Amino acid sequence: MSDTAEPTPRSDHDSPWKDALEGYFPEFLALLFPRIHADIDWSLGHRFLDKELQQIVRDADIGRRYADKLVGLHRLDGQPAWVLVHVEVQGEPETAFAERMFVYNHKIRDAHGVPVASLAVLADTDPRFRPEHYSDDLWGCSITFRFPMVKLIDWDTPERWSALEGSENPFALVVMAQICAKATKQEIFTYEESKQMPYVTTVERAGYQRGEADLLLWLIENKFGADSAEALRERIESADNDSLRRWSVRILTADTPDALFR
């Protein structure tokens, strides 16, 4: 069997999430899954199991692939455990979501014999889409699989948004950025629908780039002030998508605006 994995399709927003999860995994859990974070012995470190996850994803073959991360760590009692984080970056409700969570969890447990906690982060804007379990039943033979889930739009309230703005956790910026990005995408879609634009692909591409530039400028203003955002506006608005995504990740740790571009 070849070790070369097939290319995996990614949405426009996958890369920043994957980079943020790799760089700030403890902070990610502390912000979105605090009870789990408190049960982990972080002094023993953690490691990302990309090869193991790629094998599971390739073998499962049950739909689109997302910004998933598989992480090995230890609980406070010293026992090893793995955490499978599934980020629904594309942000659209999907019927097979819960089943995929179950399949991935089962296959990892079966292949490696370790306890696995599957966590879901949903970035869509449909308040009704809240999958938290998968169940099946045939002639009295039944299974029920439950998993922790967070919905990012639940943070889009005045009280919780203020908490994000005042948080010292760097992952708060990722959540704020995702919420703003979804709002920008929705505004673009609404405008296209009202104008009945014929070249949606081209317009969407330009809209995404403008939306990412506006979002980065907002993050710079939020972290460094309005003067810094205005001074960098021309450079950011003329940048390509790859640069914008890199800078959006770097702003998590940048001490100065100049540090974004080093």
Image: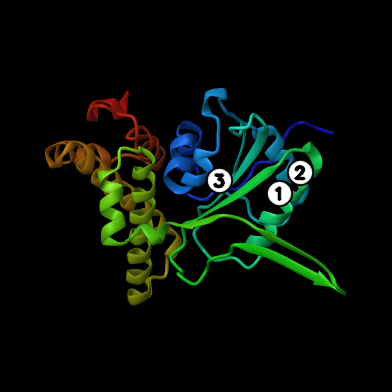
Residue that mark 2 sits on: 109
Name which residue lies at 39% across and 35% down. Answer: 246
Residue that mark 1 sits on: 105
Furthest residue in direction right, as rendered: 139
Nearer the N terminus, badge 2 or badge 3? 3
Between circles 3 and 1, the one closer to the viewer is 1
Query: Is residue 183 in view?
Result: yes
Percent position of residue 253, x then y: 34, 30
Q: Is residue 184 above or below residue 194?
A: above
Q: Which type of secondary structure does the marked residue at label 2 adopt?
A: helix
Q: Report the front residue among 178 and 33.
A: 33
Cα gap from disc 3 to disc 1, whole angstroms? 16 Å
Number of numbered markers = 3
Residue type (three-letter) at the residue carrying disc 1:
Asn
Colour scheme employed for the rendering of this structure: rainbow
Residue type (three-letter) at the residue carrying disc 3:
Ala
Residue type (three-letter) at the residue carrying disc 2:
Arg
Name which residue lies at 30% across and 37% down. Answer: 168
